[in-house]
Image (cartoon, rainbow, N blue to C red):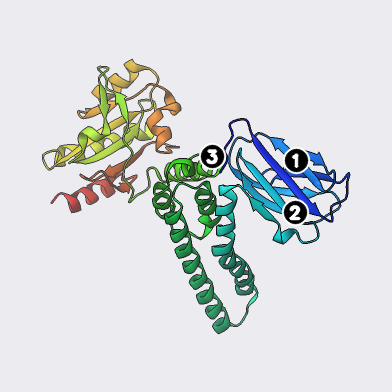
Amino acid sequence: MAQSTEGFVIKGSFTGLKDSTTVFLMNESDGKTVASDIVKKGAFTLKGKIADPDLFLLGFSGFKEGVEVFIHNESVNIFGDVNDLRNAKIKGGALQEDFLSFKEKIIPYIDRLRVVGPLITSETNAAKKDSLVRDYNSLKTQALQATTLFTKSKPASPISSFLLVVMMPGMESLEDLENRYNQLQGPAKKGLYARKIEQVINESRMAQVGKVGTQAVDFTQKDVDGKPISLSSFKGKYVLVDFWASWCRPCRAENPNVVNAYNTYKQKNFTVLGVSLDQAKPNWIQAIQADNLTWTHVSDLQYWNNAVAQLYHIQSIPANMLIDPTGKIIARDLRGEDLNRKLSELLK
């Protein structure tokens, strides 16, 4: 592949193409034209510079069809018959060669899935619907297996990240996508499609933060003495992360229950970490003392903008989450007798 930091060059020659025909290169992601030229003696040259490897449509004025081209800043030659654009030939672009391999090995499955999917929706006979569902699931499994083979054979190709974006809706879980993406290398982990995958992974991770069954995300805030305290420093214990504030009446009413739980189980590998949504430090400290909250407390004194509260999507207080010794969240919003009952089950 002839890569160029200056940009791409596409030289084309098509039989049946009249002079003065406009040729254009359109980005299929956003529909923007990135280059154009006027045909002279059946030939044209398109030049430009593109930020990331991407899928483009080489189009001709007066023709409904075009030629799909997957390129970055490289030099390629395209030729063929304008009346048979599906069989146009492209030389010099390694990305395009990988894209053609994708079309050959993956697109047949996608096309069949697109046919079977609507049939399931419209089928009213239960037995036939079940049969179609089995066919659909079988096709999806085959498509994902083909995806695995493709990405393993081309781990550094941007087409592999493009393929993962295409197949993302059919993947079973975020972990599946993440595992596949982590196996990619070099150029495949850069560019538009890599960023899309990373965005999905990051947004999905953030949406999962704080859910029962997930690992608690570590955080650090300062205690009443200004010392940084991290959640991870309590690993190996059962920890109740308690979100509260001195100004929150329901929180203050719940505090005696938390105090009782702490005093009952603090000798049985259990502790509490208070996270306050206070703004005024004196009020925070006064409430800790008044309510006999003798465990560790942290806060950034940012009210509802408290970083830990935002991380864990806390929208009302009191709120809490119980974390086991491995760091997994095993319960949320345990109050009163529910808190005592859960701890008694765990810490007999």
- Quadrant in which residue 148 is drawn: bottom left
Residue at the image position 42 percent from the left and 47 percent from the top: 184
Q: Residues within 10 Å of mark 3 (few under 14, many from 20)?
A: some
Q: Nearer the viewer, mark 3 or mark 2?
A: 2
Q: Amino acid at mark 2?
A: Gly
Outermost residue to the left = 267
Residue named by callout 1: 45
Count of numbered badges drawn on the protein: 3
Q: Which mark is residue 66?
A: 2
Residue at (70%, 50%) from the top-left corner?
Answer: 78
Query: What residue would you read off at disc 3?
Result: 191
Is 146 situated left or right of 337 in this image?
right
Percent x, y for residue 125? Answer: 60, 83
Q: Are marks 3 and 2 in contact (CB under 8 Å)?
A: no
* Few, some or many residues within 10 Å of mark 2 (<14, 14–19, 20+): many
Quarter of the image for residue 185 reads top left
Asked if residue 304 can be seen in this view, the reply is yes
Q: Give the alpha-carbon distance from disc 3 to disc 2, as whole Å.
A: 24 Å
Residue 8 image offset from top left, x and y in percent: 65, 37
Provide residue 191's location: percent of width, then percent of height: 54, 39
In the depicted view, which residue is nearer to us: 50 or 273?
50
Q: Is residue 172 visible?
A: no
Q: Earlier in the sequence, mark 3 or mark 2?
A: 2
Please tell me whether mark 1 sits on a helix, a strand or a loop: strand
